[in-house]
Structures are given as C-alpha cells and as structure tokens.
Image (tube, coloured by chain):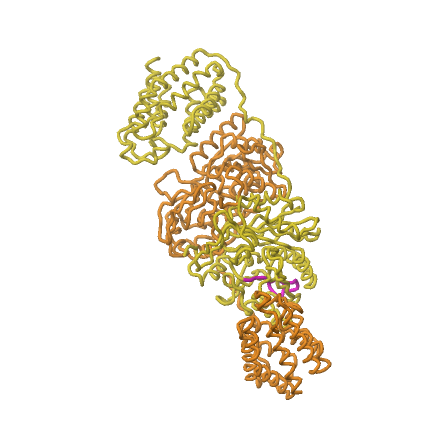
Chain colours: A orange, B yellow
Amino acid sequence: MKQFMNSKDALVTEAIDGLVRSAGGALARLDGFPHIKVVVRADWDRARDGARVALVSGGGSGHEPSHAGFVGRGMLTAAVCGDVFASPSVDAVLAGILAVTGKAGCLLIVKNYTGDRLNFGLAAERARAFGLKVAMVVVDDDVALPDLPQARGVAGTLFVHKIAGALAEQGADLETVAAAAQAVIRGTVSIGMSLDTCTVPGSPKEDRIGQGKAELGLGIHGEAGVEQVDFTGARAAMGMVVDRLLPHVGSSDHVALLNNLGATTPLEMSVLAEELARSALGGRINWIIGPAALMTSLDMHGFSVSLLPVTAEQVEALAAPVAPPAWPGLAGLGEVTIRPLPDGLSPIQPEPSGHPARRALLERCCTALMAIEGDLNALDAKSGDGDTGSTLAGAARALLARLDRLPLADQTQLFRAVGMELSQTMGGSSGVLLAIFFAAAGDASASGKDWIGALSAGLTRVMQVGGAKLGDRTMIDALAPALLALPSGLGAAAAAARKGAEATAQMTRAKAGRASYLTADKLAGHNDPGAEGVARLFERLAAGA
Amino acid sequence: MKQFMNSKDALVTEAIDGLVRSAGGALARLDGFPHIKVVVRADWDRARDGARVALVSGGGSGHEPSHAGFVGRGMLTAAVCGDVFASPSVDAVLAGILAVTGKAGCLLIVKNYTGDRLNFGLAAERARAFGLKVAMVVVDDDVALPDLPQARGVAGTLFVHKIAGALAEQGADLETVAAAAQAVIRGTVSIGMSLDTCTVPGSPKEDRIGQGKAELGLGIHGEAGVEQVDFTGARAAMGMVVDRLLPHVGSSDHVALLNNLGATTPLEMSVLAEELARSALGGRINWIIGPAALMTSLDMHGFSVSLLPVTAEQVEALAAPVAPPAWPGLAGLGEVTIRPLPDGLSPIQPEPSGHPARRALLERCCTALMAIEGDLNALDAKSGDGDTGSTLAGAARALLARLDRLPLADQTQLFRAVGMELSQTMGGSSGVLLAIFFAAAGDASASGKDWIGALSAGLTRVMQVGGAKLGDRTMIDALAPALLALPSGLGAAAAAARKGAEATAQMTRAKAGRASYLTADKLAGHNDPGAEGVARLFERLAAGA
C-alpha cells in the first residue's frame, strides 16, 4: 500500500466523512454506509427548499472533487458516490433523489457510462413511482473516440453542474433546468492527455506509457488512451489536444475548462494554461475555469481541456458565486499584463567626495585585512574550506580600488556605498551579510546615529536577518564586544574582540552558518575564522593608532 | 522529460505567464524576465493604495500555489519567485518591494532558509535607503528538527499571509501588521510526511523511500526527512505526525492547516482529514484550512499539518474573504453530520390480486422464454458469452414463481411489480434495462395509457437511458416494430419482430451494448440474440393465441 488510506474498502467512506467533517457544517451524508454513500447539502430541507429544482449527480469515486466536492449552494444538491471507478447502486441513487427532491423535482446529471446510465435511470423510475418529477441528462463530452456514438462523460460535466446549478438556484423549473443542461451537453467537447497511468488502490500500478510517450484521448477510469503519442514538451502536447478539439469548435466565444487529472503540478498546469492561450484555439477562448483539479482520475499525471461555446446567459451562470470551495471560479483569459520595472533597481551612484581621516581609516582597514589573508585561510582550513582570508582580502582590494569614487564626506552615503560595493564584490552569504551590515549602518546614520551607533545598528540588523546570536561561533562573537567597547577607544575594542574571538574556540556547537553542519571535534580548540578576522583587524587598527 | 513543460529554464516564467493570464485581470507581472520574476496585484497602485501596508513574500518556485497564487486582495500584494527551489535574487526582491510599497510601508514574509533571509534582508536594506518603511518576519514553523534553532519555514507560512493580509486590508499600520505576523509565527508549528520523493525538473528522480516506508519530518525542497518510518496506513501515519506536534501544542483552540504536498489524491487527503479529526489532537482543533494544496513540493506524494493556537481576532482574520481562488477558506472542523435514510428505499409490496387473462398471458410469456433458452444461448455463443437464453429463462422462472404475489388486477402496479422483480432476479445491464422498461410502462399506465401505449412508453425510456437506437443491433430492433404492429394483433407483431430480428444479421457494427466491442466478421450473418428472443417470444404467443 503506497497510499494514505487504511484499507481499500474503507477508502471512500472515510474520505466522505473527512470531507463532510471539514466542510464547516455545509455538508451532511446519509446514514447508509457502506452501501449507500450520499453527500447532501446540510442546509437543504426538501420540504422547504424543494420548491427549487434539486441537482443530483455522482458516479464512481476517484474523480474528486467530483462530485461530492461540488455539493453546495449554486451547484449540486446531492452527490451519490460509488466505490472507486464503480457506479453507485440503484438504491444509493434512489436514496440521494428521495433525500433532496421536493415538489419542483430533480435533475440527474449522469456521465455516459453504461453502469451510471442504468443505475441512475432505474433509480429515476423508482422515484417517479413515488410521484416525484425526475429528469435525467447524460453528459458525453469526450471526443477521443470519434466513431463511437456513445462518447464518454468527462470533465465537461462541470459545465453542466455549474450552469444548471445557477438556474436551479434562481428558481427555474425542471423543464428549463433540464433543457439548459441539455444545451450545454450538446455544445461541450473534451479531450485528455496523460504522461502516466493512475494508481488504482489495491491494484499494482500499470506501467503502460513508456519513456518519451504520452497517451492522448484517455478516459478517467484508467482505460488506455486512444493513441500513444511522442511526448516532446508542453507546447506540442497542447497542440495535439487542440488539434483534436478544433474540428468540433466553431468561431464563437468559448469557455475553456483546464482540468488537472490528479498529480500534475500547479507549475505544469500553469504552463499548459499558457500553451492553451497561445494555441490555435487561444483566440476563441475568452474565459477559463482553472487550471484546477475538477474531475480527476486518482493520481493521473495528466490534464484535460473542455470547451463550451457560450451565450451571455451561460457566462453569467458560470460566473455566479457558489458555496463549494472546490469550484475555482470563471476568469477572463487574456493577455499577460506586464508592468514596467520600478525605478531604483540600478543604485544611484553617489557623488564622490573627500574626507582625509575617513579615507585613511578605510585604507588601514583594507591593508589590515589583506595582511591577515594567509593566517585566516589556514585557520579556516581546519573547519571549513579555507577561504575566509581570501574572501575578506578580496573585498578589501576591491574597496581600495574604489576609494576615489566613494562619498567619503557623507557618513550615511559612505556606509551605503561600502555596503553596495561589498555586495557586488564579495560572493556568498558573507558578502550579503556585510552588505546588510553597512546598509543598515547607513540607515541608522541617516536617522542621526554617530558612527559607532550606526555600526551597532548594522550589527543588530545582521543578527536579525542572519539569525545568529552571541555564542553561535560567528564573527559576531568578536564584533559585538568590540563595538560595545569602541567608545573607550580602539585599544579597548581590540581587547574585547580578542577575548570574544578566543571564546569561540570553546564553542563546539555552531548554531548558524556553515560550521553548524560540523561536529564538535572539528571545531574544538580553533577560533572561528570570522571572529579571528575581526580581532586581528581591531588589533592592527589599535596598533597603528 | 516527463513533465508538462517546454524546458527547465522556461518552466517558471511560462508558468507565471499562464497564471497571470488565467487570473481574469487580477494579476500582473513585472517586466524583468527571466531574472526578475515578480507577480503583483493588478489592481494595486502604490501611490493610491500604498496608504495600506503591502505584503511581499516569495522564495524558490516549486511550492505553488505559494506564493504567486496567493497574490490578491486580503493576502499578498506581491510574490517574488525564484527558480525551482532557488531563492530569488536581491534585485528581484527589491523590484517586488519597490513595485508595491507606498507610504504605509511593506512587510516581507520570508521562510527560514539562509538564501531567502539574506536576499530578502539585503533587498529590505536597499529599499530602506529609498526611505521606504520595510519590516521583515521569518517563518520557522517546522518542528521536524527539534535541536536546530534554525527551524525551516513550511506551510504554516500561510497562516502569516492570511492573518497579516487581513490586517493590512483593514488598514492596520506596519508595526501592527508585523507584530501580528510575529505572534502567528511564534504560535505556528508544522510537520510533514511523504511516501515518495518529488521529481525535480531536469533531474533524475531519487528513489530514496522504499516499499512500506515513509519519510517523516521532511522539508519542501526534496531534502530527506528526519527519519524513515514504517508506513502501515493513514491512521498510523497521522498518529506519528500528531505525536511530533503534541509536545508543542497547548490546550487552547487551534486552527489546523492540512496541506497537500503535491500529488496526494483528494481521496487520500480527505481520509487524512478524517484521521486528524479522530487523532489525539482532534479535540483541540476547532477549525481547518483545507485539505488543499497550499505549499507544495512539486509532485511530492505527501502531506503536512500546521497548527496555530488562535484568538478570536485571528479566527476572524483567517475567515475573512479574499480574492485568490487558491485560498480554500476556513471551516469549522466538527462531527460528521449524518441524516437518516429517506423513506421509500424498501419498495412497498403491492397487494396481490387476481386477473385470469393477464395471469395466463404472463404464464405463456414465461413458458415461451424458458422453451427457447437453448437456442438463444447457442446463438449468443457466436458473438457473446452464450448466456442470453439462460438470463431470460431464469427471469421467467423467477416470475412464474412469484405469480401468486403479483397485483394482477392493477395494470400500473403490475408493470411496476414486474420491473422490480426483474431488477432483483436478472443480473447485469439487461436486468436493469428490463426493469426500467416495465417501471416506465407503469408510470405511463398511471398517466392513463393502455397497455400497448404503456409498453411503448417503456421502450422509449429504455432507449433514452440505455442510449440505443433502432439499427444498433439490440433487442430494440425487434421490440420496437413489434409494439408498433401490436394494435393489429399478435400475428402482426410477431411478423414485425421477425423482420426486425432478421435485419440485425446485417448490422455488423453494433453501436451499443457489449457487441459494440466486437468486430464486424464476428457479427455478420447472425441475428442479435436479444432481438431473436423477442421475435421468438411473439411468434410463440401468436401461435398459442
């Protein structure tokens, strides 16, 4: 068993209970398990509400959300569920009819399979013997088998549910609702394609469709497609589907229903929607329902397209709001609305300006970082990939080369420019983190912080974004105490940074960054190279001051 | 390639265009393909609407409908999409922020992955440099890895989108929206389980999870679960998930979010909903979102459960209507509402009554059918399974045995009783069709038709329900002309039936019933056994009359 079920026999009844229970009181089921599996609108009282036409549909299970998922105001009044891919019994259908049908009567919406036709047909007879008005329509939208007059009923059935449902909700009489349903059936055509077969619970999976192949014109009960075709991609696949539909389609406005047969990902379904819109049919499709799972075939990796040429009244009926959350709504299918990119993506180049003291400090920092490159690489090699020194030195070299173009006289702009520079020249997470550090320092500076306060604000933001705290064995363990001590001078800062860096050698469980994937014995006794770099930098600055 | 796409590189951009195009004008995208993939509300003008807080989320693709599918009134203002399972770039996030953020600022909702944190974090800094108010929250709801302080962000993110979205829609300021989001994040816990790995486009499928195994505590990027467990069914599976959640859950009211990770069928998801409700957690879950695909992992055959302890205000925010059709809504999780079966399923036994002429006719019919059993079986064996004679003779024997209990004096009740009898004693389609024939004859009789008219009405209904027409090589080809000739007497009817039966030998393309699956050479030259049976019956009745 590779399915989330408890047993094949309990699958449908447990699923129905789960559905009913999760519907917030909108659904109920009849007390006939396991033989009679009927889901009804909980708010429907046939004595009170039966002045409107009831809609009853159903068939074998395995096509969810069809049909129980479409029970609710504006769609079905009751759904009669068989076992997986098996028609419900006459008694079950009769129970569904009797449970919801009032004086306005009911319309049975049946997909064109012999079992369903017969069982719904006989149940209709029995219900008529009670004096109920019962009409029945048979949906036969599948164009896969052009020579068979008995076309199968597939996802186009949803057009019937929705349009008949809207009319019934408005209070149309049975004759009107049935005629409207029949008109929809006459107009609807569908065809499906799949890359794999479905997995029938309790049966071994059939491995019928080879690599590079797809089945075109398949049914929804695991039956083989009319033909196996070469599969070369979404565009060609949709092209074949459209080719089969085109002979049946006039030049009027159409609604398309793009149905996920089960296990197709939303990404793929959206690509298929795009291909449908770009296809030879695209210009005739004004509205779309989906892409969504509407009439599935268990976990089939496939899709189907249904088309209905529509009148304004039918569009209105398809667009009417309904209660079942499984109904995705009707939307216009149009061009892709494209907005221009906003201004500001190319950062404004700040006006270069001079400030000898800041320039000297920056130069000293860069020189210091370049000087410790080899030591830091060696330290990093003990617990990482040995490039911490090179990463920092590379950034220092790039910054030195840019000194003439930096806005040195404007502290806010300078922080931001350094951040921008580092994000462009340093690779990986460390570059982004240092860019965030200086950018946040720039923000704080703009709000009036002095340079130490600004750098502290930068540190706070880096900790927030990066998710590292003191004690996590990162450069923060040296930088945080250094910034705290900085008001007392560079010497104090250097001492604090050194103490912090030494402490990281005892932190054997890194909680952030790459070192978090290493075991304690790889870390013990070595300072974190980032923290060591900060300590060395402050020590060199203090020594030179 | 076993996916409906055109190329790995175009997958996400084409899917975005398909989504935008199918949204009926509700969505737009920025003009930055392929590097910048940002979907925005088409109705949102940052100058006009930016007095409300904008919500920006995103991350790698492959989690649809997250996040682009949740862009719309009441949820996200923009979604920034990376390639499959890859964080979007800083520029892409910045473009998203700048495109929608007005004077009220924006909230970035980020799942806890290093790439997302850093790229969203740096983009936030850049946006702040433009003077925009930007807050950022990081969702870390996954409890699969209890020792890692950096928990992953998974489907619980949807709670944040929805609650923050409702507040933003109501006009709450950025501080309020961010605090509400943070409160949701503190409360949310999630864990997932899968029966199979996902198929990453362009990569071979990893076959990591063996038969009878499941992965518990998996991530949404194909990374392995925390442990492989034995899979014995839906109940035990949900039990393990609930066990991992229980230590994190208090006794207050909770909302559960039941997420389909991709390829799990709706049937399975409903069974899982049922198991969740019945689990040790069930009593603490008052509301449910889903089951639905909310945060998928491509086509993963799995599910996740997210829990949020809620205040009344949060419930209200979760229940508020929104524009994106992918949001399934909030529903109460309660008991299964069970309605009693309707009266009328056990057919009323008619009062037996006598009518010598009808009794004699019925006896002659039954005797005739029993007499031709062997001949019809032999004929059927040439094109079928050789049981037509036995099926009809068996029904005749059963009817004969019931003669004393039939309401012979009441034509309407008699037709109905014969139909009921045949539906109970004849197997398969033929039994149901004959039951429909007699039941419909009963209906027609009740509306005042004489017996020939009633039988004709029965025939019309059988043709409608069974979908067979004259010329389709069925018993109708003999029965229809016989009933038409019957007013002229049994001899005329027999002659007409015979002519009709003989004509079926030339009908080499059966269009209904089982014979429709046979080739012409199997049918040519043999009468249809059903039609032959009707002809023989009328011939015997005529001979005996």
Q: Between residues A289 and B401, which one lies in front from this camera angle?
A: B401
Which x, y percent locates residue B469? Answer: 37, 32
Look at the image and give the residue range highlighted in magenta: B44-59
- Tell me the quarter of the image containing the C terminus of chain A: bottom right
Magenta stretch encompasses residue B53: yes
- Residue A131 versus residue A492 in the image, above or below: above
Furthest-top residue in view?
A: B356
Which x, y percent locates residue A254? Answer: 45, 50
Q: Residue at x 60, y 85 (%)?
A: A363
Query: Does residue A255 appear anywhere in the picture?
Result: no
- Residue B126 versus residue B473 in the image, above or below: below
Which x, y percent locates residue A514? Answer: 57, 68
Q: Residue at x 41, y 21 (%)?
A: B395
Furthest-bottom residue in view?
A: A356
Residue A166 as seen in the image, left or right of residue B506: right
Query: Does residue A205 appear anywhere in the picture?
Result: yes
Magenta stretch encompasses residue A527: no
- Count all numbered tags in the image, as a single digit: 0
